[in-house]
Amino acid sequence: MNSSRRQVLKGGVAAASLFLPLPYAWVWAQSEGAVKLVRAPKVALVLGNGAYRSVPVLRNAVNDAIAIAEILKGFGFEVTLQLDGSRAGMEAAIAAHTLRLAQGRGVGLFYYAGHGLQLAWTNFLVPVEAALRKAEDVQAGCVDLSVLMEGVRKAANPMNIIILDACRENPFEGDFRVSNKGLTQMDAPNETLLAYATAPGNVAADGANGLYTESLIKEIRTPETRIEDVFKRVRLNVRRKTGGAQVPWESTSLEEDFWFLPPKPLLQLAEERGRKEAEERARAEAEAQRLAEAQRAAEAQRAAEAQRATEAQRAAEAQRVAEAQRAAEAQRMADAEAERKARAEARVKREREERESAASERKFKEELARWEKIKDSRNPEDFYAFLLERPSGYIAEQAQFRLDQLQKPIVQPQPGANGIKPLPSGTNRHARGDEFAYEYINGLKSVTTRFVKRVTYADNDRVEFNDGGTVTDQMGTILRDGYGIRKPGMLYVPADLAVGKRWRTAFKLTPSNGSAWTTFWDFQVEALEEVQVLAGTFQAFKVVGNGEARYRNKTRLMSQTNWVDPVTMTPVRQHIKSRDAVDPNQVFFDDFFQLVSLKLVPR
């Protein structure tokens, strides 16, 4: 660990092994939002610029744009394709695209292949007529990408995908130079996935033009693949083919799952939703017509009754009583039907959750068996294969970290607009002699204590605290402590972090008393924010986790919030809570941890 990194940290390392083992599992259930996305209208704007007038022609940009447009049409997108666009034409197409998103409230996709560059932390797309000789020409002659981002935010449609295959070498550098290569990092707007052909601040490898879109076309054609898994596989394929010289990047704020080719059960569910809604509309219209007809008959009846004497009034009163009785009976029948439907839906939900829970345990056992065979391998290909098979699996983050230990990417993480440069994946996070002091608050008993942890042994694979009382790997994943042995380990911090990132993890705890818990976690990075602890003030990623753990017929629900320092990829603050799944009022613990001070040995 270099000295500058330690100065930023000011002692901000909190080993994951210091926090209590928390049984937990996430019960997966398909959301109503994902069903609505399947049924939503889909529009796409595809731009391809290749015939530049003042710099060499890009051979693949137009062909890539045409190929993407044809595939999207096959997926049901209403596609607008513009090739070799001028600045005015590109801006008009973007304005029309965001207007359609606001009006149609559907799924939007924007794809651009061509030259792009950054200036003063702002990204620009380069039209074919651009002639750039000085920095002022960029703003005057190029398309500011923030216009698209603002249009997407204002449209407030349920989901957007923005794909930028624009990370080539700046062809205008003979006339002027920009301070940073490639495109700068941007946060995705709400409900948006933003994908770069290579990491922010970097450019695509020489001769690799078209490689990113070629891999993207292959993966989006794969049936029943979640959009986030599509881009994870694209990243792995491009990185593998370029030897790490080009590593695609994504920023996501998606909260719902999306498929270009959805699973058949989801399609069937969407069709069933549409059929039921049509039936409900038909029933409502028929009921409205019936009520209107009844109203007209009642009005005629009242007009006739007004002309009669007391006898007509008594008849009218009798009629109203009868109508009230019929309405009450109809309401009772409707309430009974609603209750029956609610019980049926609850039963179906319980059965689905039980099936999904059993499936998750089965998948975890299969994945763990596969991991046990390769975890000590020194061959990067073993981990490439593992990640391609399970890009969002329970052990994907450990596999990614191990791959980066064995074969560090040529492309390193770049500082964002806030100047923070994350610790690269695969970098050792602990060294022998490091010493940490912590404060622990037992929320149930209102008791505060402090303790110290020392690293007494560390190599590339194993870290021991206090002479082996706790054992982790270099990610901070707990392998063993006083509670027992965990396979494949209890993971708090993944291989890399970005706002919007989601990951799953699971482990099996085997303690000495034999009560082995199978535990599942679901995590998401919600924000990058300032947090203050006793050791100082940090810009940290806020990571929220939820889940469940089972042992025989016992189930515990868990929640936790971690603030992770991006310079060292370790938590500096944590809040963790456990409660009974059947009785939420039964809380097992409600604990808080924060870093007090540290002493790190020179690297």
Image (cartoon, helix red, strand yellow):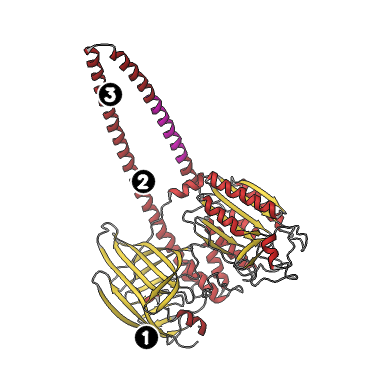
The answer to which image quadrant residue 166 occupies is: bottom right
Secondary structure of residue under mark 3? helix
Q: Of callouts 3 and 2, which one flags the residue occurring earlier in the amino acid sequence? A: 3
- Residue 37 lies, with reference to residue 462, above or below; the image says above
Upstream in sequence: badge 3 or badge 1: 3
Mark sitting on residue 467 = 1
* Mark with earlier residue (2, 1): 2
- The residue lying at 30 percent from left, 17 percent from top is 302
Residue 341 image offset from top left, x and y in percent: 34, 40
Reading the image, the residue beneath label 3 is 323
Whether residue 442 appears in magenta in the rendering, the answer is no
Nearest to viewer (mark 3 / mark 1): 3
Q: Amino acid at mark 3?
A: Glu
- Determine the CA span between mark 3 and mark 2: 37 Å
* Magenta span dominant secondary structure: helix
Apparent side of residue 380 relative to residue 342 in the rendered image (left or right): right
Disc 2 marks a residue whose amino acid type is Val
Neighbour tally class for label 2: few under 14, some 14-19, many 20 plus, Cα within 10 Å: few
Q: Is residue 289 magenta?
A: yes
**Residue 41 in view, yes or no:** yes
Q: Percent x, y for residue 348?
A: 36, 46
At which x and y percent is residue 308?
Answer: 26, 11
Tell me residue 110's x, y (percent). Answer: 60, 53
Look at mark 2 in the image and give the residue it sits on. Answer: 348
Label 1, secondary structure: give it.
loop
Q: CA distance from mark 2 to mark 1?
A: 51 Å
Under mark 1, the amino acid is Asp
Residue 224 can be seen in this image: no
Foreground residue among 87 and 56: 87
Stretch in magenta? 272-290
Label 2 secondary element: helix
